[in-house]
């Protein structure tokens, strides 16, 4: 039953992992695929501007509103998730297939949101009987290693 390393390698061919995932949930559009590929490639949650910049860097034009809609669609389908960022601006990241959840660290000094892959919110385990958990967010606030170092050096 232990299905280890089921993740397919990043495909650059005809059908990417992003395309397959989207096709399983609905209509495949260019922007949905591009946005999901961008999230899958990132090791940190990205805000809308970062995603738009990434897409622009790939040389393809994606309408701003279309990118917003694609993000909403991905979140609605449970393919991506929202992470609270600075100033109520959401950040987005791809949901892992293995149901892995992890905590996020919000640096109040530089505003970055970092994934703490090794810290798993234990909320799901502590939930009383009868509840079904769809989403859990654990966001820690403080200073990231880079900012904390700078402070200590002063
Ligand atoms: Zn920082
Ligand atoms: Zn994360």
Image: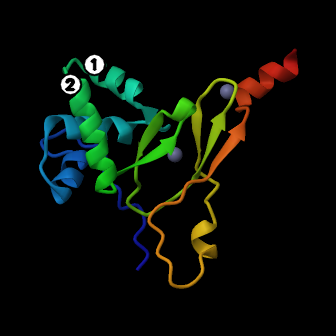
Mark 1 is surrounded, within 10 Å at the Cα level, by few (under 14), some (14 to 19) or many (20 or more) other residues, namely few
Name of the residue lying farthest toward the top: 154
Which residue is at 12% across, 50% downward? 27
Q: In this view, does 16 lie above or below 113?
A: below
Mark 2 is surrounded, within 10 Å at the Cα level, by few (under 14), some (14 to 19) or many (20 or more) other residues, namely some
* Element marked by disc 1: helix
Q: Please give left or right for residue 2 compared with residue 29 in the image.
A: right
Residue 40 coordinates in the image, percent (x, y): 36, 42
Name of the residue lying farthest toward the bottom: 129
Which residue is at 68% across, 45% downward? 140
Residue 67 coordinates in the image, percent (x, y): 26, 32
Cβ of disc 1 within 8 Å of ligand 2?
no
Q: Please give left or right for residue 79 compared with residue 109 in the image.
A: left
Residue 101 coordinates in the image, percent (x, y): 52, 58
Q: Number of marks in the image?
A: 2
* Element marked by disc 2: loop
Residue that carries the numbered disc 2 in the rendered image: 62
Tag 1 or tag 2, which sits nearer the N-term?
A: 1
Residue that carries the numbered disc 1 in the rendered image: 56
- Viewer-nearest of labels 2 and 1? 2
Task: Look at the image and tell me in which quarter the N terminus lies.
Answer: bottom left
Quote the CA–CA distance across marks 2 and 1.
Answer: 8 Å
Task: Look at the image and tell me in which quarter the C terminus lies.
Answer: top right
Q: Nearer the viewer, residue 58 or 121?
A: 121
* Disc 2 and disc 1 in contact, CB within 8 angstroms: yes
């Amino acid at each position: 039953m232990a299905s280890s390393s089921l993740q397919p390698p990043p495909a650059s061919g005809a059908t990417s992992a992003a395309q397959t995932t989207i096709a399983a949930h609905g209509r495949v559009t260019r922007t949905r695929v591009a946005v999901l590929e961008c999230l899958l490639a990132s090791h940190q949650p990205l805000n809308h501007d970062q995603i738009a910049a990434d897409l622009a860097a790939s040389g393809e034009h994606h309408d701003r509103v279309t990118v917003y809609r694609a993000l909403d669609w991905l979140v609605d389908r449970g393919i991506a998730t929202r992470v609270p960022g600075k100033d109520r601006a959401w950040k987005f990241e791809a949901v892992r297939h293995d149901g892995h959840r992890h905590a996020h660290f919000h640096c109040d000094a530089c505003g970055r949101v970092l994934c703490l892959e090794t810290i798993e919110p234990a909320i799901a385990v502590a939930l009383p009987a009868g509840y079904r958990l769809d989403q859990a967010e654990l966001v820690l606030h403080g200073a990231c290693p880079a900012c904390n170092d700078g402070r200590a050096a002063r």
